[in-house]
Amino acid sequence: MTLIVAIVASLAFVHGAAAAETAPSCDVPESFLPADVELTRVANAIKDHHRLDISVIGSASSALAGPDGARFAYPAQLEQALRERLPGNEIKVTAHIQSRQTTADMAASLAGIMAEDHPVLVIWQAGTVDALRGVEPDDFRNSLDQGLDAVAAGNGDAILMNMQYSPRTESMLNVSTYADVMHWVAEQRNILLFDRLAIMHYWSDEGTFDLYAATNGYAMARRVHECIGRALASQIISAGHFETDKLQTTR
Amino acid sequence: MVANPMAIVSQTPAVSGERDLRLDLFRGVALWLIFLDHIPDNIVSWITIRNYGFSDATEIFIFISGYTAAFVYGRTMHQRGFVLASARILRRAWQIYVAHIFLFTIFMAEIAYVAATFENPLYAEEMKILDFLKQPDITIFQALLLKFKPVNMDVLPLYIVLLLLFPPALFLLLRRPNLALAVSAVVYALAWKFDFNLPAYPNGVWFFNPFAWQLLFVFGAWCAVGGAQRLGGVLRSPIVLAVALAYLLFAFAITLTWHIESLDRFVPGWLAEWMYPIDKTNLDVLRFAHFLALAAVTVYFVPVHWSGLKSPILQPAIRCGQHSLEIFCLGVFLAFAGQFIIAESSGGPLLQTAISVLGIFIMIATANLISWYKSIEGRGPLSKAKPPDADLAGGEA
């Protein structure tokens, strides 16, 4: 038994080491980035004011710990990607990240964020803390509705972002129920979902990232956040319909 | 309603002693499917029925468990009285409780290992699920109270509660079966109306609401005490068959739209509005109906004396179904172990397939081993000499 564990563990180690050395492209097929709902407010803000204010609200998986974590986390990466791809426009991404906040907590603070930031687009990352705490799916759904009402009332477009694909905790943390609710709410309200779960799953299947790897280094986490930021920028640009010549690829 | 309730009972399988191998067969298959579904991201789980309709293997398992519980303990209650039958039912509940706690221990071992070896800043948030290891005093107590249940460990607690409530239900089923079924349906409706369920830890409610799922269990029991015969005419009707097939086709079409996003637009808004979400926790009516349709079609095409039930190809599934508690627990354990191996070796579809096949093979081998043990003790399905044991007739309860 010990021998098997040792062999398996060394295999995992070799895998992890190999993944850390290479940095393959993390392009995401278009089918993972639906843009069938037009982000009209985003489009108008760019067209009329050459300016785009985005607020990101989420829990710990929207941030990175470690030195200079905020600079490497996906909100900052999104800002950078949009600046590169929409030159001549002023892009500002404000992050409201707090670990341990549930969707209900975030729903309650969204009205304040709308009043303070006046964003034209809110990216709302939700679900992980609710899954951790076992919040009732019905309550989760109501909180999403309540928060999205607040965004609409504050005159903003919205994109929901679901959980990370985390294969190592999959047998302990049931995220699929909450992912289903988010799919359903996005469908019902006709808003976009950034399907982080499916995208990271795709990266894992493709071997882009070894998400099983155990590491205490930040290299892979930063790279994943960079790729999420870029994929998110692609989705916003496609759904804004304002840069048709650059719709095709992530980077 | 018949004037002498015992007249019904005496005609039923509950006392006739004839074993319906279809129950063992489909319960065995359900156990395999539950195993496959419990390995996350298992490519082989694409073959399981949850991808092709509303209901899944859990419905089959609970229905057949209700059926066999009534079949086995109904006879005991009829022949030896309420007290003795209740005592046996409660002993069964206790066995399942012990099995559940055993599985919980294995789960804890896995979690503790992951907590000690896995680290990745990307998953700082998700790893908080392991925080409960920091307060074993609370967590283990909550597990003993069946309030703290790790992922995929919800079925046995449901089964325990269903058995605890079964003695009075069986008492009524043997006398006024239709009334018992009606009471069950009322409880189901009230659970929906007033949204009651058992509490879970750290918060929330049970994943399988016992007050809703009891309907399926009692319906199974009702079938065992004569309901199946009464439904016989209905089940042979081609109209019923057509309706059932149509509904299965509808459910299949709807589930297709879950897997192929581009088909989503063909589901009309009013239908989606009415239909979704399809609630597993509270046994959505659509799921229940889907199970009924599946059962109706199955019963139509697989009669009780179907010769195929004796064919050697089906014996492995039948054997697994006959030792359902052991094989269920083994399946949960194998799913843990399989998932662990897949995670440790970053495994792909090939490894998933190998583990799925190997797991089912181990389940079959174990079922045969248990049969062998019981046969040498002279009390299993393999032994013909002794009269059938109440705990084993028709498989276990």
Image (tube, coloured by chain):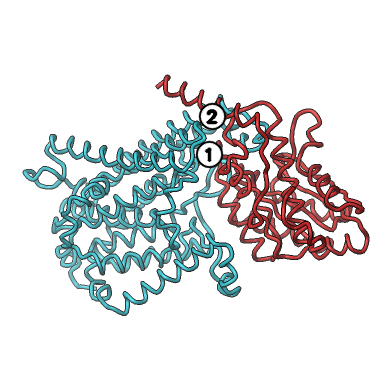
Chain colours: A red, B cyan
Q: Residue furthest front?
A: A245
Q: Nearer the viewer, residue A16 or B1?
A: A16
**Chain containing mark 2:** B
Q: Is residue A70 above or below residue B162?
A: above
Residue B159, horizontal then vertical, whole percent: 37, 48
Q: Is residue A8 left or right of residue A105?
A: left
Pointer 1: residues within 10 angstroms few (<14), some, or many (20+)? many
Q: Is residue A186 above or below residue B367?
A: below
Q: Is residue A34 above or below residue B329?
A: below
Q: Which of the labelled discs sits on residue B114, or is there none?
A: 2
**Chain containing mark 1:** A
Q: Is residue B364 left or right of residue B390?
A: right
Amino acid type, mark 2: Val
Amino acid type, mark 1: Met
Determine whether the residue tagged by mark 1 lies in a helix, strand or loop: loop
Report the residue marked by disc 1: A172
Q: CA distance from mark 2 to mark 1?
A: 10 Å
Residue A212 visible? The answer is yes
Determine whether the residue tagged by mark 2 lies in a helix, strand or loop: helix
Disc 2 to disc 1: CB gap under 8 Å? yes
Badge 2 and badge 1 in a common chain = no
Could you say which quadrant of the image residue B269 lies in? bottom right
x 45%, y 60%: residue:
B283
Q: Which of the labelled discs sits on residue B49, or is there none?
A: none
Q: Nearer the viewer, residue A58 or A22?
A: A22
Residue B166, horizontal then vertical, whole percent: 32, 53
For the N terminus of chain A, the image quarter is top left
Residue B326 visible? The answer is no
